[in-house]
Image: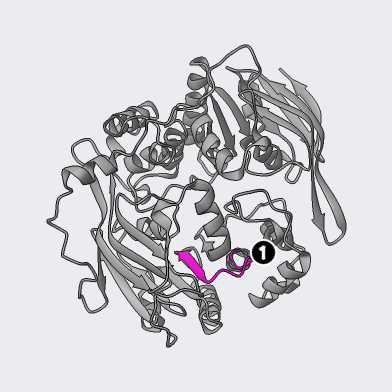
Amino acid sequence: MTEKTNPIIQMRNVIKAYPTSDRPFVALNEINLEIYPGEFLGITGKSGAGKTTLLNILSGVSDLTVGELLFYSAKHGLSDSAIPIHKLNEDQLAQWRGQNLGIVYQSFELMPTLSLVKNVMLPPDFLGSYQPLVSKERALELLELVGILDHANKIPAHISGGQKQRVAIARALVNDPPLIIADEPTGNLDTATAEIIFQIFEKLVERGKTVVMVTHDESFVPRFSRRLQIVDGVVSNHNGNSVQGRRAAEVKLSASSISQVADPWAEEISTEPKQNHPAIVLRGVSKVYESAAGKFTALKSINLQLGYGEFISIVGKSGCGKSTLLNMMTGIDHPSVGEVIVGNKHIYEMSESQRALWRGRNLGVVFQFFQLLPTLTLLENTMLPMDYCKTYPFYERPARARELLKLVGLEEQADKLPAAVSSGQQQCAAIARALSTDPNILLADEPTGNLDSRSAENILTLFEKLVSQGKTILIVTHDPSITQRTDQTILLSDGEIINSAG
């Protein structure tokens, strides 16, 4: 750790609680914590202890229930004004994250159709407004820093898991953030590759970065400048001394705290009712990426209109533009040219943070790799969108989540962690989560790609049931047998729609 004594980030009396059927589940309990510039802080604990919740609070991704989260820039100390992260609105949070934070996930989260350098050039989605691409020179510089420059023009499918994680680290460094948060970045890697990734983080700390890393690997513990352990939401130093203001295992939330858990949901839910307009309209949509060989056109002048209550499949070879097309509809990626209208909304006329909130309330998105938070139960995972989007009253959320889990056949597994259920059940839980804000439109990117035939059949039957209830479902798939069960099939080739038939 450096000689500086002022923290870069500070948590004061932080409580994070999630609603359950009986009383709030306290995931973090009266946390008092200071993280210092140049520190390599390791956080350990069993599954469900609260590690990921702590990182989500530190990054401003999840609202805290009680307490304060303060950030001190390099130009400020404790005697100066801190940035109260817990008081920032969505746009301010996005701007703060973009300027000060790099996040590295266990699952890499790379765009599969883009080269490695292009993945690094893509602006982070939390910058608060659409940004031009990062310069290619900057991206190559970062790929060199993490030792993968020779593979810059390959796509993710052509490199190893460890190399993908290096790309994710390079991307997290794009805006030269002082603070880097890493959630199990070596969790899916072999020992030798994990060591390489850890050494990259050590190098970053030597260069003055502050790194906070969650890990299950006890072999790394002696190499952290400090190690914290979480047990049932209580944080202690490695020697067992609590870093809390008071031991809170027996502390119950006060009535005022409970009211804070029941967040202000009075904002109107802006879900668009099914009216006399199409569900999705694309007009002249093109998407162009820069590559080493020049411009690459991923989508070419797409014109498309889809109605409510339809089951639609999108098929085509790898790299044809299927996922890019889906990203246009979800507002995750930005078209180079053209209009995207979803639920009668011109979604790219909104700011990034407005679009993120709109997406949470109006679209359900299901990924191939589930992307459930590993330390939350299936019930808690299902309630998360209601929490983030402030939909439904606080005390209605547990019952609604249980009904959705019942709908997908997981009523008996509601209180289990994702690791305790099968891949098919995890995908069903991801669908329940996608439905939690009652969106009219569900978009699924290869949702059966990692499932056995029986689990895949259950998912498709569920989708058919949802369509019969009026939902619009778009499914990207490589499986031609699925197209026999959909109302319409969109065939893509080299970024163009070459067939759209019912």
| Displayed quadrant of residue 318 | top right
- Is residue 385 located in the magenta-colored stretch of the structure? no
Quarter of the rendering occupied by the N terminus = bottom left
The residue identified by callout 1 is 159
Q: Quadrant of the C terminus?
A: top right
Please tell me whether residue 176 belongs to the stretch shown in magenta. yes
Q: Vertical placement of 386 versus 9: above or below?
A: above
> Which residue shows up at 18% across the image and 48% down it?
253
In this rendered view, identify the residue nearer to me: 196 or 70: 70
What segment is highlighted magenta in the picture? Answer: 172-185
Describe the element under mark 1 as helix, strand or loop: loop
Residue 405 picture quarter? top left
View extreme (right): residue: 294
Q: Residue furthest front?
A: 80
Residue 56: in sight, yes or no? no
Residue positioned 66% across, 77% down in the render: 145
Q: Where is residue 150 drawn, in percent x and y?
A: 75, 73
Q: Nearer the viewer, residue 62 or 45?
A: 62
Going by the picture, which residue comes out furthest to the bottom?
Answer: 3
Quarter of the image for residue 157 reads: bottom right
Q: Residue at x 63, y 68 (%)?
A: 170
Judging depth in this view, the residue of 241 and 65 nearest the camera is: 65
Residue type, numbered disc 1: Ile
